[in-house]
Amino acid sequence: MSNIYQPTPENINKAAETIKNGGLVAMPTETVYGLGANVYDAQAVASIFEAKQRPFFDPLISHIAEADFLKTYAQTDERVMALAKKFWPGPLTMILKRKDNNSAIDLACSGLPNIAVRMPAHPVALELIRQSGVPIVAPSANKFKSISPTTAEHVRESLGEKVNMILDGGACKVGVESTIIDVTGKQVVILRAGGTSKEDLSCFLNEEVLLSDGTPDKPSAPGQLLKHYAPGRPLRINAATRQPGEFFIGFGNIKDADLNLSPKGDLCEAAGNLFAFLRLADKQEGYQSLAISPIPEQGLGLAINDRIKRASYK
Ligand code: TXA
Ligand code: MG
C-alpha cells in the first residue's frame, strides 16, 4: 500500500496526529518536500537523522506557521521581525540566537547556540503545523547527500516506508531550498543561496548582504558539504555542448539539449525544473554521464549554481 496521501482535511488531521504521536510526515513546501517531526520530541527528531542517514552535527530547520510565534521561540530584534514580515511565508530561513532554557530542542539544533527557523509558503504545510500545535523540524526528504525531492513520488523513491505519511501537495513551485541567512551578527550573511535572491534581500535591507565563503568571518551552514545533491553518474557543469556518452541538460537557446531547464532562459523556471531533471537524466539508459549548460550567476542562478557545483563534485 502506498504511503502517499492526498491533502484532504481528514488526511491532514491524520498527519497532525502522526506528528503529535512522534511519527514522521513528509510535507510539501514551496521549495522542496520536507521530512517533518515534532521539534520537542527528541526520539522523533532522532528518527529523522536515522531515516536520512544524516550525521547528528547537521542541524534542522524549524518550520512555524505564524511569524509572531518567533518571538517566543528564539531571540528576535526589529530587523528580524521586519525580514519575517516582508519575506514570510516564503523561501527564507533565518539563523537566530536560541532562547535560554530550551534544551528540548538541543538535538534539532545539534547543540549549537543558534536555531534555524522559517515559515513555508504552502497551505498544506501551514495547516499541518497549525494542527500539530508545535514547530515542525524538516530537512529535505531525501537520503543524505542525494538529490532533493520536489514531488511526493521523489520522496517515496528516496525514503519509502521510513516515513509514516507523505502528503502530496503537487510539484514544488520554487524547486530549490530556502535561502539561509545568519542574522545574529551586525551584517547579514547568506549561508546558503536559495529561493530568495541576494538582490531582493539587500534591496529590502538597504545594505550589503554578504555571501558565505566558509572563512571564519563568513562561516557556512554545517550541512553545506562539497558533495551534495548528487546524481549517481558524474555531472559536468558549464558545458557548452554535449560530449560523446553524455546526457545534456540545457538552459536557454540550446539546440542539442536532451532536456532544457528553461528554453526562454527564465531562472525561476529553471530552478523549478532542476532537481526533477537531474533525477530524470540519471535514470536514462545508455549514458555514462550528465552535462549541464552554464547558468547566469544572478537572482536564483546563485542557488542553481551552488546546487550543481556540489552535485558535480568528484
Ligand atoms: O527549503 C528548505 O530550507 C527545506 C524545506 C524542507 O524547508 N529544508 C532544507 O533542510 O533544506 P536541510 O536540512 O536539507 O538543510 C538545512 C540546512 C543545513 O545545511 C543545515 O546545516 C543548516 O540548514 N542549518 C540548520 N540549522 C542551522 C544552524 N543553527 N546554524 C547554521 N546552519 C544551520
Ligand atoms: Mg537537504
Image (cartoon, rainbow, N blue to C red):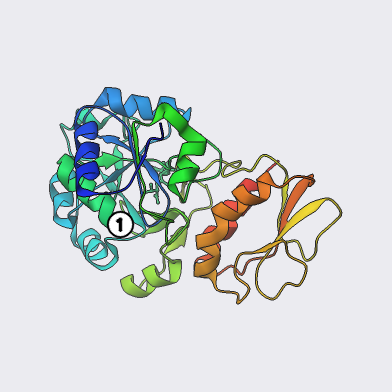
Asked whether residue 74 appears in the rendered view, the answer is no
Q: Residue at x 27, y 61 (%)?
A: 88
- Residue 6 x, y percent position in the rendering: 32, 47
Is 114 situated above or below 191?
above
Q: Residue furthest top?
A: 43
Asked whether residue 63 appears in the rendered view, the answer is yes
Q: Nearer the viewer, residue 278 or 78?
A: 278
Which of the 4 quarters of the picture holds residue 293? bottom right
* Amino acid carrying mark 1 in the image: His
Q: Residues within 10 Å of mark 1 (few under 14, many from 20)?
A: some
For the N terminus, which image quadrant?
Answer: top left
- Residue 84 x, y percent position in the rendering: 24, 61
Q: Nearer the viewer, residue 41 or 55?
A: 41
- Residue 219 x, y percent position in the rendering: 46, 46
Which of the 4 quarters of the picture holds residue 37? top left
Is 26 situated above or below 173?
above
The residue under label 1 is 122
For the C terminus, which image quadrant?
Answer: top right
As helix, strand or loop, the secondary structure at mark 1 comes to loop
Q: Residue at x 55, y 73 (%)?
A: 266
Query: Is 86 situated left or right of 142 in this image?
Result: left
Q: Nearer the viewer, residue 198 or 11?
A: 11
Which of the 4 quarters of the picture holds residue 104? top left
Query: Is 245 situated left or right of 176 in this image?
Result: right
- Residue 61 x, y percent position in the rendering: 33, 43
Q: Residue at x 31, y 29 (%)?
A: 45
Query: Is 37 situated left or right of 152 in this image?
Result: left
